[in-house]
Amino acid sequence: MEKIDKLKQAIKESNKIVVFSGAGLSTNSGIPDFRSADGLYNQETKINIRPEEIISHSFFVSNPDDFFSFYFDKMVYKDALPNIAHKYFAKLEKEGKILAVVTQNIDNLHQMAGSKKVIELHGSVERNYCMKCHKFYSLDEVYNEKHLIPHCSCGGIIKPDVVLYEENLDENAIMQALDAISNADMLIVVGTSLTVYPAASFVKYFRGRHLVLLNKSETRYDDIAEITIHDDIKNVIEELEK
């Protein structure tokens, strides 16, 4: 409880908070993370190829059929809804306390909860574009129950606007994220083990007063954080709202 009280006080005295979120934030919405026992990378695939390889750029180009079969089945959760944590951070933004949400997630749940300033480092399942004519499509327009390759009216393959392995992060998103983090007076890192680069290195740009790490497992930045809580984020938020 001492850490929760300390976190409450830090939030109270901060007005330029940046939330840096990872897959662990959305597990309570029914979306698996990547590295846990039940995570995406530990799931069996129909084609006996590691998930990390399937969601790579080269695999997408050479095997679009198998890519979309896996992508629609394992990475798109059309019925997922924001959980208590997404809603809590959206409420803080509405109160004028949050500068931005920087997320590694592609699920659009921050926006669904009401957050307006969301910087998506790895893109979003909600956006898709034709690789031939660059026309954009929504998820509803490309999703199909049979998990077939979506095609544009021009005949081109429609690619999800998400960052695959072997692809670079969007430069504009990087600059926005670093600007927000470097100007924050509080950085709340939540639901990420901080192992995926370059995003994991963004914490080094924080110059503010309160660095907070909320994650089930330890991270490499635990020792330098002011507040570290290893627990389900749902439990943390419930305590904060008491």
Image (cartoon, rainbow, N blue to C red):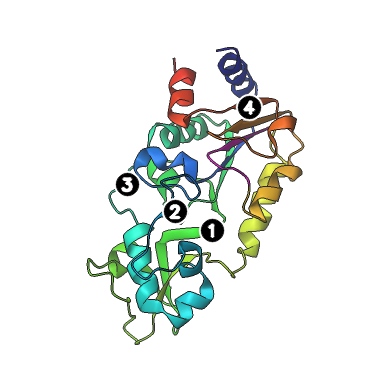
User: Magenta includes 191?
Assistant: yes
Crowd band around label 1 with a 10 angstrom C-alpha radius: few (<14), some (14–19), many (20+): many
Q: Mark 2 points at which residue?
A: 42
Q: In the current view of this chain or complex, which residue is farthest to the bottom?
A: 155
Query: Which amino acid does the dot numbered 1 rest on?
Result: His
Per the rendered image, the range of residues in magenta is 186-194
- The kind of secondary structure element at disc 1 is loop
What number is the disc on residue 228?
Answer: 4
Q: Is residue 102 above or below residue 45?
A: above
What number is the disc on residue 186?
Answer: none
Q: Nearer the viewer, mark 4 or mark 2?
A: 2
Q: Name the residue under label 1.
A: 122
Distance between mark 2 and mark 3 Cα atoms: 21 Å
Would you say the residues marked 4 and 2 are in contact, meaning their CB atoms lie under 8 Å apart? Answer: no
Ranked by sequence position, the earlier of labels 2 and 3 is 2
Distance between mark 4 and mark 2 Cα atoms: 27 Å
**Res 106 visible:** no
User: Magenta includes 99?
Assistant: no
Ranked by sequence position, the earlier of labels 3 and 4 is 3
Q: Which of marks 2 and 3 is in front?
A: 2
Ranked by sequence position, the earlier of labels 4 and 1 is 1
Q: Mark 3 points at which residue?
A: 80
User: In this image, 142 relative to 171: left or right?
Assistant: left
- The kind of secondary structure element at disc 3 is loop
Q: Quadrant of residue 229?
A: top right
Query: Which amino acid does the dot numbered 2 rest on?
Result: Asn
- The kind of secondary structure element at disc 2 is helix
